[in-house]
């Protein structure tokens, strides 16, 4: 591969930061959002005219599409949120009654989890509202042992929360097995699907998931500012809403509605975003999740083949295609994560994300927390195997250059040491 001149911006731009947000979006997503903005523009439930009715119907269509994709029980139990973090805050904080105190409330999470799980739990623990158990993961694979979760359950355990797929290592957790454990213990099971929804098949009922949180803007291919929380029917009786306000329903009452989804959806909807999300979900359904997952597997296999055996380069998480998706954390000897990202962009036009990725315990588990984290490359449905091969060639070339520089530096140090010794 011909390397562009140093400090000259590479002509191509290859987006490999889909774990942060997906890009590009399907054409139909953009068309649907433009159609709403130019032809409808109304707020659902805030008018009796046709545009408001049509907007409400489009929002309902999105719920039905989500229900089909995730094999839910009722479309109305998909509650729209600002993003996945917002959904997780509702799930986690809504299940904990502060009045009970830490002695009567206990929560379980894991070391692979994102801060969207860790921070809400930690904030409540600091307030004295609960005690928490953070279950460790295997440092090599990032996998949690379901039996460790089983052993952590107490009589006062109020929830088990886990990140389905790590945004650091791409590790896929055995949620069906964990869901069975949670269901047998009668403990609500909260799943963070930020990196799995749209990548992998998720069957809410078969997987034993009580609360599923997901963003709309990642692998579901919708715009930023969208997300949802699925609430298993019956759980709305114990899940507290975190905000109250106008819903466009039972407006004659000054109390929050108790029916779904209005109980949790105060304020005007992000109609343009939800309509875009709906088209993203339709695009996935048309392609089928099975085909998209198979494509991701091809990209993962290409990435592993290209990185395996490269001197001076390390990638983290599962070393084979099993139990992982297309999220890769890498380090090149002699380069900080931010330096590697800068070289990948300036010399090769590859766009990545360096750092800790809002998952400090995951980086502690894989041993990268104290050294600035990793550089992450993450795939989407519009990348090809040729794109991934270009990225692995770039990484191999960078690593080879750093290895040569490192050896020269070592020889220089050895020569200086010999000269100093001989001078004595």
Image (cartoon, grey):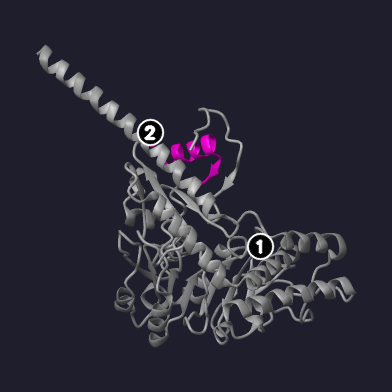
Toward which corner of the image does residue 328 lie, by quadrant? Answer: bottom left
Whether label 1 touches label 2, CB < 8 Å:
no
- Residue wearing tag 1: 222
Query: How many neighbours does mark 2 have within 10 angstroms: few (below 14), some (14-19), or many (20 or more)?
Result: few
- Residue wearing tag 2: 401
Give x and y (percent) for residue 312: 32, 41
Q: Is residue 338 magenta?
A: yes
In the displayed orientation, state which residue is furthest to the right. 49
SS type, badge 2: helix
SS type, badge 1: loop
Q: Is residue 41 magenta?
A: no
In the drawing, does residue 54 fall left or right of residue 147?
A: right
Q: Which residue is at the front of the view, 303 or 178? A: 303
Give x and y (percent) for residue 303: 44, 54
Magenta region's main secondary structure? Answer: helix
Point out the image quarter for the C terminus: top left
Question: What are the residue bounds of the magenta stretch?
Answer: 335-354
In the drawing, does residue 278 fall left or right of residue 188?
A: right
For residue 214, say whether it is visible. Answer: yes
Q: State how far apart marks 1 and 2 are (Cα).
A: 39 Å
Give x and y (percent) for residue 103: 36, 75
Toward which corner of the image does residue 63 lie, by quadrant? Answer: bottom right
Tell me which numbered mark, 1 or 2, is placed earlier along the sequence: 1
Q: Which residue is at the front of the view, 240 or 347? A: 347
Toward which corner of the image does residue 179 lie, by quadrant? Answer: bottom left
In the drawing, does residue 64 fall left or right of residue 161?
A: right
**Which residue does the image show at 73% across and 78% down from the upper left?**
254
- 407 in relation to 249, above or below: above
Indicate which label's residue lies in the foreground, 1 or 2: 2
């Amino acid at each position: 591969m011909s390397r562009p001149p140093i400090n000259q911006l590479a002509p191509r731009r290859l987006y490999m930061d889909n774990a942060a947000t997906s890009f590009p979006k399907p054409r139909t997503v953009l068309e649907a959002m433009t159609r709403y903005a130019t032809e409808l523009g109304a707020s659902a439930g805030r008018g009796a005219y046709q545009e408001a009715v049509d907007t409400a119907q489009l929002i309902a269509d999105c719920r039905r599409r989500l229900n089909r994709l995730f094999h839910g029980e009722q479309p109305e139990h998909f509650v729209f949120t600002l993003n996945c973090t917002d959904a997780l805050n509702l799930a986690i904080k809504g299940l904990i009654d502060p009045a009970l105190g830490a002695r009567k409330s206990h929560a379980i999470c894991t070391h692979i989890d994102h801060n969207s799980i860790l921070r809400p739990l930690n904030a409540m623990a600091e307030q004295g509202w609960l005690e928490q158990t953070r279950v460790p993961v295997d440092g090599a694979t990032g996998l949690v042992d379901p039996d460790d979760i089983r052993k952590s359950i107490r009589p006062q355990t109020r929830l088990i929360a886990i990140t389905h797929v790590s945004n650091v290592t791409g590790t896929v957790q055995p949620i069906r097995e964990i869901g069975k454990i949670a269901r047998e213990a009668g403990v609500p099971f909260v799943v963070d699907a930020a990196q799995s929804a749209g990548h992998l098949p998720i069957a809410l009922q078969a997987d034993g998931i009580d609360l599923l949180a997901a963003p709309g803007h990642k692998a579901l291919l919708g715009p930023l500012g969208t997300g949802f929380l699925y609430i298993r029917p019956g759980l709305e009786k114990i899940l507290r809403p975190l905000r109250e306000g106008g819903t466009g329903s039972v407006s004659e009452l000054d109390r929050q509605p108790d029916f779904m989804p209005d109980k949790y959806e105060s304020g005007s909807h992000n109609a343009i975003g939800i309509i875009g999300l709906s088209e993203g979900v339709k695009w996935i359904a048309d392609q089928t999740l099975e085909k998209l997952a198979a494509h991701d597997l091809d990209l993962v296999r290409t990435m592993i083949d290209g990185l395996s055996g490269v001197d001076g380069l390390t990638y983290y998480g599962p070393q084979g295609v099993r139990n992982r998706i297309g999220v890769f954390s890498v380090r090149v000897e002699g380069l900080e994560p931010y330096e590697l990202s800068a070289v990948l962009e300036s010399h090769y036009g590859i766009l990545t994300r360096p750092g800790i990725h809002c998952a400090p315990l995951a980086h502690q588990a894989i041993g990268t927390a104290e050294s600035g984290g990793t550089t992450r490359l993450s795939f989407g449905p519009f990348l090809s195997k040729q794109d991934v091969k270009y990225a692995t060639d770039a990484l191999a070339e960078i690593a080879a250059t750093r290895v040569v520089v490192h050896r020269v530096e070592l020889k220089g140090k050895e020569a200086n040491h010999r000269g100093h010794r001989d001078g004595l």
